Amino acid sequence: MGDPAATFATPRLASGALFVDRGKILLVRKTYGHRWDIPGGYVDRGESPAAACEREVREELGLNRTVKRLLVHDWAPNETEGDKALYIFYCGELGEDEDDIRLDGVEIDKTEWVGINNLAGYVIPRLVRRLIAAHHAHTSAAMLYLEHGQPLC
């Protein structure tokens, strides 16, 4: 009999920060991949998803922010990248801190506030669904579990 652990899922984990200004979400333009996204990235080995979110905001935007609460957890396997568990955290309002944003200039070259109804012009469909769900969770004080960006329960 083989090792039962050989069948256990070993997903990649990623965390992102949702910043909201009324009906708009802060997007960052990455210099690689699908280009537009929210601030965030992959979780390092031994790092919590919340700590990864805070680190990514610090690295990409130059801001020291603390995670306030989890908005969504999305099970989003990808054919080329394997199993993924994606987290979006609320990290507070930017307010005057927006003037302190300092892009890293390597991974991120631009930010833009995008209306919730205009996300499809910026990001892939699954991310549109995830961001709309995160915005809903933010405005309703909920936490949502998603699969492929779709609420399951």
Image (cartoon, grey):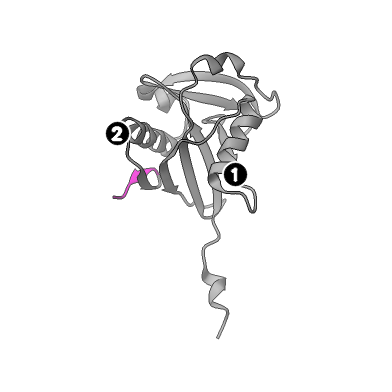
Residue in view at x 43 percent, y 47 percent? 74
Disc 2 marks a residue whose amino acid type is Ser
Q: Give the number of marks.
A: 2
37 to the left or right of 131:
right
Label 1 crowd bin: few (<14), some (14–19), many (20+), radius 10 Å: some
Say what secondary structure mark 2 lies in.
helix
Stretch in magenta: 149-153
Q: Position of residue 89 (x, y in %)?
A: 47, 37
Q: Which residue is mark 1?
A: 42
39 to the left or right of 24:
right
Quarter residue 103 falls in: top right
From the viewer's side, name the closer residue of 62 and 122. Answer: 62
Q: CA distance from mark 2 to mark 1?
A: 27 Å
Q: Position of residue 19 (x, y in %)?
A: 46, 26
Residue in view at x 37 percent, y 19 percent? 22
Q: Is residue 32 visible?
A: yes
Examine the rendered structure and indicate whether residue 129 appears above or below residue 43.
above
60 to the left or right of 98:
right
Quarter residue 56 falls in: top right
Q: Earlier in the sequence, mark 2 or mark 1?
A: 1
Where, quadrant-wise, is the N terminus in this rendering? bottom right
Residue 80: in magenta span: no
From the viewer's side, name the closer residue of 104 and 67. Answer: 67
Label 2 crowd bin: few (<14), some (14–19), many (20+), radius 10 Å: few
Residue 150: in magenta span: yes
Residue in view at x 54 percent, y 46 percent? 49
Q: Is residue 78 visible?
A: no
Q: Position of residue 146 (x, y in %)?
A: 37, 47
Disc 1 marks a residue whose amino acid type is Tyr
Q: Viewer-nearest of labels 2 and 1?
A: 2
Residue 140 badge:
2
Q: Position of residue 84 (x, y in %)?
A: 51, 51
